[in-house]
Amino acid sequence: MSNRQIILVELPKEKLAPTHFRLVEGAVPEPGEGEVLLRVRLISLDAANRAWMQGATYRSAIEAGSVMAGGAIAEVVTSRAPQFAAGDIVFADTGWQDYAVLPSKALSKVPRVEPLTHLLSVYGIAGLTAYFGLLRIGRPQAGETVVVSAAAGSVGSFVGQIGKIKGCRVIGIAGGAAKCDWLVRELGFDAAVDYKAGSVFASLKTAAPNGIDIYFDNVGGDILEACLPMMRIKGRIVCCGAVSAYDRAAPASGPRGIPGLIVVKRLLMQGFIVTDFFSERPEAVAELQRWVEKGQLKIKEDVIEGLENTPSALIGLLAGENLGKRMVRVSQ
Ligand SMILES: NC(=O)c1ccc[n+]([C@@H]2O[C@H](COP(=O)([O-])OP(=O)(O)OC[C@H]3O[C@@H](n4cnc5c(N)ncnc54)[C@H](OP(=O)(O)O)[C@@H]3O)[C@@H](O)[C@H]2O)c1
């Protein structure tokens, strides 16, 4: 039995490329007292994986020469900690490898749902980020207009659907006609704007003639700048992420209109990290489950097979290849 690992051999200076990674093979590690040996089942691919290479965020920066970090669903193989037993399913930052040894306090036990992939999509970080960001910060009221960027991605596709459940008019912003079609036809968005096809501001004027009450911002940059003047008085901007700034050397300068428009329009602009709300996680998962069972929330998963394909799967996600939640299946 051997352990394949994907090492981040060099930090990218510009765009992330396959040459920044190398696959190595070694022995499966042995757990010490209080530790657990995990077999990785599914690795979550997140836009934030790239942001971690730019410097410290809500976690420390990734260093060149280490196993690429990343959250995963894994199965306990051997436990030397009383809280875990062989066969338990956990979520943990195992990194990109077949096996990992971690201290028990670094693991969260999760229920064995079928299919397991839902633990990374609707019941994982993606679904919960959409749920808490929209409901706790955006606070949608029926009849309001919600705009969400990276709308065909994992977080964005749930944000728009939850907005519809709450009775809002929902507009998604995504790259390309196919994604925009999918948002409207499959997910029930009221309109979609292809940000690659022309002026986002002009298209939003048509799609949201009365302005925006809630902008759920996954991308920052030019799209945030286009949404700002469209905000209605007392609108809310949910700052979830800034994917437009991740795959480059350094973040670009900020959008114009801040703080002037924020003041004049009495806007709330608030950032959050999904874990801020984890004390409410059981109730949130239960509500997401009810919506899934009633057919109100559709789940789109984009599963890539094989650990060796993880680097290209992340590079592809940053380029917008994915529809819904992208992940890599490492073992069955
Ligand atoms: N605050 C939190 O706790 C939290 C938790 C999880 C995720 N997030 C954030 O949520 C956002 C979405 O992340 P995710 O992991 O779910 O990824 P994702 O949305 O599934 O995939 C990223 C998407 O971003 C879009 N994109 C890439 N470059 C872009 C650009 N320059 N302008 C506009 N869109 C661009 C691409 O779609 P297109 O084809 O449409 O370009 C791509 O599919 C990220 O900002 C992430 O940091 C925050």
Image (tube, grey):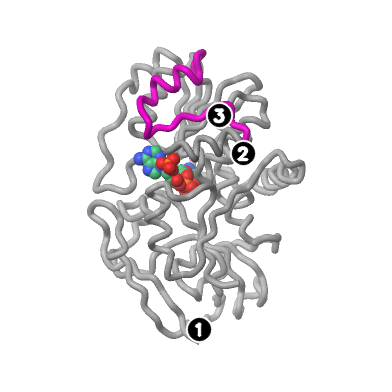
Name the front one of labels 1 and 2.
2
Residue position for label 2: 186
Residue 281 vs residue 175, the one in the foreground: 175
Label 1: state its secondary structure.
Answer: loop
Residue 200 lies in what quarter of the image?
top left
Label 1 vs 2, first from the N-terminus: 1
Residue 312 seen in the figure: yes
Percent across and percent down for residue 144 are: 59, 20
| Residue segment shown in magenta | 187-211
Residue 275 seen in the figure: no
Residue 231 vs residue 207, the one in the foreground: 207
Tell me if mark 2 has few (under 14), some (14-19) or many (20+) residues whose alpha carbon lies within 10 angstroms of its own: few
Label 2: state its secondary structure.
Answer: loop
Label 3: state its secondary structure.
Answer: helix
Identify the residue shown where x is 61% and y is 59%: 117
**Image height check: is 284 above or below 88?**
above
Residue 250 placement, left or right of 121? left
Residue position for label 1: 30
Tell me if mark 3 has few (under 14), some (14-19) or many (20+) residues whose alpha carbon lies within 10 angstroms of its own: many
Percent across and percent down for residue 218 are: 45, 38
Residue position for label 3: 138
**Image height check: is 30 above or below 297?**
below
Query: Is residue 190 found inside the magenta-colored segment of the image?
Result: yes
